[in-house]
């Protein structure tokens, strides 16, 4: 991963993911990169087109680094790690190196990261439903972004290894 990337793009599954990732990035980066852009794939079904999106961002749009964040859809850390390796293998098939693209999976899904600062166990299935039960206001992307902006990052990072890994990468990507 490069020390300093001035143009960083995120590729996420949907609107809620976009809102949360952008909110977290603002909190992690003291000053934003020269250019930041987030592309929504439109859900898990669009993952096969991920590589074309990544290539476009790198080649045509001239981003230095692309950060891909998908839901693991499993609480099994080993399965999630295997999935990351599969996605990295796809990168290589498309001649995309991991020095220009980072891949992360939210375990079991991105909403678990917001649960990580509550009494709820974040890394078990059903995070979306449990987040709505614990925080009924968490229904729109704007509300999820607001929750991310107020999230106790220290506690959330301690309770969610996938969140900690993601935020550590953002810290090292742009200072």
Image (cartoon, rainbow, N blue to C red):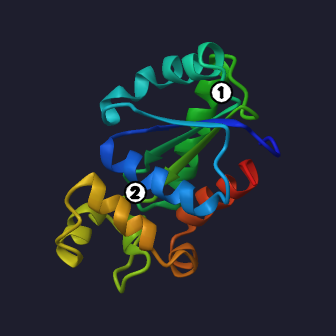
Residue carrying label 1:
63
In percent of width and height, residue 67 lies at 59, 40
Vertical arrangement, residue 123 with respect to residue 89, above or below: below
Vertical arrangement, residue 62 with respect to residue 67, above or below: above
Vertical arrangement, residue 169 with respect to residue 69, above or below: below
Nearer to us: label 2 or label 1: 1
Q: Residue furthest top?
A: 60
Query: For this view, does 104 lie left or right of residue 112?
Result: right
In percent of width and height, residue 72 lies at 43, 50
- Counting residues from the N terminus, which is met first, the one under dot 2 or under dot 1? 1
- Front-most of 95 and 149? 149
Q: Residue at x 56, y 63 (%)?
A: 27
Query: For this view, does 26 lie left or right of residue 108?
Result: right
User: How busy is the neighbourhood of tag 1: few (under 14 within 10 Å), some, or many (20 plus)?
Assistant: many
**The C terminus, quarter of image:** bottom right
Label 2: state its secondary structure.
loop
In percent of width and height, residue 94 lies at 63, 16
Residue carrying label 2:
110
Query: For this view, does 32 lie left or right of residue 24?
Result: right
Query: For this view, does 120 lie left or right of residue 35?
Result: left
Q: Residue at x 56, y 54 (%)?
A: 25
Cβ atoms under marks 2 and 1 closer than 8 Å: no
Q: Residue at x 66, y 20 (%)?
A: 62
Q: Which mark is residue 100?
A: none
- Front-most of 121 and 143? 143
Q: Residue at x 80, y 41 (%)?
A: 2
User: How busy is the neighbourhood of tag 2: few (under 14 within 10 Å), some, or many (20 plus)?
Assistant: many
Q: Quadrant of residue 108?
A: bottom left
Vertical arrangement, residue 51 with respect to residue 67, above or below: above
Q: Residue furthest bottom?
A: 119
**The N terminus, quarter of image:** top right
């Amino acid at each position: 991963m490069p020390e300093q990337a001035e143009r960083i793009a995120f590729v996420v599954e949907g609107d809620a993911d976009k809102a949360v990732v952008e909110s977290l990035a603002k909190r992690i980066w003291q000053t934003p990169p020269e250019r930041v852009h987030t592309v929504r794939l439109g859900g898990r079904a669009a993952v096969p087109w991920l590589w074309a999106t990544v290539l476009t961002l790198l080649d045509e749009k001239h981003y230095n680094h692309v950060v891909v964040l998908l839901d693991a859809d499993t609480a099994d850390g080993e399965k999630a790690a295997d999935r990351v390796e599969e996605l990295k293998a796809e990168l290589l098939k498309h001649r995309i190196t991991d020095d220009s693209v980072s891949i992360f999976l939210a375990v079991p899904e991105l909403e678990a990261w917001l649960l990580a600062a509550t009494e709820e166990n974040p890394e078990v299935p059903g995070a979306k439903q449990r987040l709505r039960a614990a925080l009924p206001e968490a229904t729109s992307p704007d509300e999820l972004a607001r929750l991310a902006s107020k999230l106790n990052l220290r506690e959330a990072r301690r309770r969610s290894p996938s969140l900690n890994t993601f935020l550590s990468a953002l810290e090292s990507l742009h200072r």
